[in-house]
Image: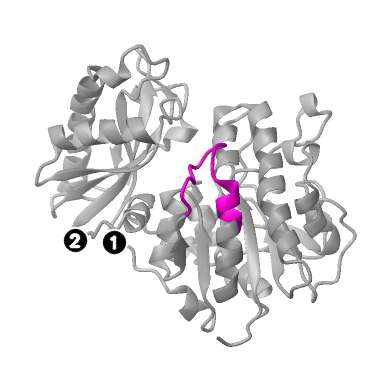
């Protein structure tokens, strides 16, 4: 392999936040103990990154496409087909893949929990198998993913992806009647798709409510929530975009692994990676250290901080930030100390704890390496990062900067 510049991106999903009075006017990132991320900021250059361009969903697929430089404003395929790629689901030309959450809707028809109480993967597999047995047909198939994060695929030219939808994690405590699917055009296919999914959702809700696994659960998985549809992705390969360089992704969740597969990056599977606080941190560290031997860029993603933010649980968010720093950032940087590897840290988007949903504010970014002279910023934070000398990056500027292209 040629002696290309190597780099690791640490991606703490949803970490950026607002200043909070209960944290003495600091954000969770500023309040938490984060010596690893602070060292990147103190020894390198700081700035911000625009991850959510105008006119696109404020979702993690868009944000992570942006961080990796794949410009979703030009070729965003929808979250459903990205996650289908992760699962190895071969989509036909006329298949429309949808992300399909298992959610909790209360008796007064209000969406209360986008994750059905952070449904365990084992319970989710049982419920998805039951839905598959009951409702799979030539028109629709259900597919289990990870925990509450699942898929359904509509088959045939009678269906459309031109549907307006509401993200469930941005819609908690809102009546379902205000969150209905709507056609985005006047085509008969769009109208039929909405009618089909509305009927399917009502039948599935009745079926799930009667399932014994949902008995006596405080947040039963009693509804399906289809969103972010699309056709089979056509995305540029990482090596083509970045002059023959290679990349690898390490994550628990299908959206990140799907982006890796769609762009020809290696997807490193880590046993015990869960997408929450009980994830296998040591396994991710070992995977990253092995992957950087044979790749130019390794993308180390952690989902737990995003989940704690959507829960609105400040104590858990602080814990997740500190565990990410102590269990991912510090051991990887220590193991690679003295090498020529560049490092970057940034969230993919903010999730303010008070809002419990994504916002489009540019995220803080810090980069360090032997060829980056340090600026005046001494710790990693939403407040200080914009004062650094890196400025506001967008598109593929981050990866090109890290790989020194």
Tell me the SS state at disc 1: loop
The quadrant of the rendering that contains the C terminus is bottom right
Residue 31 in view (yes/no): yes
Residue 212 found in image quarter: top left
136 with respect to 89 (left or right): left
Q: Which of 87/278 is in front?
A: 278
The quadrant of the rendering that contains the N terminus is bottom right
Image location (x, y in percent) of residue 344: 69, 62
Residue positioned 33% across, 58% down in the render:
85
| Residue 20 position (above or below residue 215) | below
Q: Which of 117/14 is in front?
A: 117
Image location (x, y in percent) of residue 340: 74, 75
The residue labelled by disc 2 is 92
Residue 67 in view (yes/no): no
Residue positioned 79% across, 28% down in the render:
23
329 drawn magenta = no
Q: Residue furthest left?
A: 138
274 drawn magenta = yes
Image location (x, y in percent) of residue 307: 54, 36
238 with respect to 98 (left or right): right
Residue positioned 18% across, 26% down in the render:
203
The residue labelled by disc 1 is 232
Q: Main secondary structure of the magenta part?
A: loop
Q: Residue furthest right?
A: 376
Colour scheme shown: one colour
Q: Which of 102/195 is in front?
A: 102
Look at the image and give the residue range highlighted in magenta. 270-285
Residue 312 found in image quarter: top right
């Amino acid at each position: 392999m040629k002696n290309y510049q190597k780099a690791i991106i640490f991606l703490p999903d949803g970490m950026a936040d607002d200043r909070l009075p209960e944290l003495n006017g600091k954000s969770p990132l500023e309040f938490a103990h984060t010596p690893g991320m602070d060292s990147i900021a103190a020894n390198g250059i700081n700035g911000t990154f625009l991850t959510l361009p105008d006119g696109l969903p404020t979702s993690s697929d868009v944000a992570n496409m942006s961080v990796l430089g794949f410009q979703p404003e030009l070729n965003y395929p929808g979250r459903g087909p990205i996650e289908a790629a992760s699962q190895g689901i071969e989509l036909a030309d006329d298949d429309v893949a949808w992300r399909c959450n298992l959610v909790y809707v209360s008796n007064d028809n209000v969406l209360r929990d986008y994750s059905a109480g952070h449904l365990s993967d084992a319970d989710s597999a049982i419920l998805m198998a039951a839905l598959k047995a009951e409702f799979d047909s030539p028109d629709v198939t259900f597919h289990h993913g990870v925990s509450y994060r699942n898929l359904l695929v509509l088959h045939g030219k009678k269906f459309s992806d031109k549907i307006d939808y509401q993200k469930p994690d941005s819609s908690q405590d809102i009546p379902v009647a205000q969150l209905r699917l709507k056609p985005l055009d006047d085509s008969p296919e769009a109208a039929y798709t909405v009618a089909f999914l509305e009927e399917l959702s009502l039948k599935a809700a009745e079926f799930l409510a009667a399932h014994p696994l949902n008995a006596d659960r405080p947040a039963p998985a009693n509804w399906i929530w289809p969103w972010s549809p699309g056709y089979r992705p056509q995305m540029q390969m990482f090596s083509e975009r970045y002059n023959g360089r290679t990349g690898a992704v390490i994550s628990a969740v299908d959206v990140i692994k799907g982006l890796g597969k769609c762009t020809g990056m290696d997807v490193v599977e880590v046993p015990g990676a869960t997408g929450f606080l009980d994830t296998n941190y040591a396994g991710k560290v070992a995977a990253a250290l092995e992957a950087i031997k044979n790749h130019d860029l390794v993308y180390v993603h952690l989902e737990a901080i995003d989940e704690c933010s959507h829960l609105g649980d400040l104590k858990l968010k602080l814990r997740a930030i500190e565990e990410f720093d102590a269990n991912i950032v510090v051991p990887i940087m220590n193991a690679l100390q003295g090498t020529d590897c560049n490092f970057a840290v940034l969230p993919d988007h903010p999730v303010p704890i008070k809002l419990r949903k994504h916002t489009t504010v540019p995220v803080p970014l810090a980069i360090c390496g032997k060829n980056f002279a340090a600026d005046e910023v001494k710790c990693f934070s939403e407040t200080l990062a914009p004062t650094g000398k890196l400025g506001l990056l967008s598109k593929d500027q981050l990866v090109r900067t890290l790989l020194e292209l």
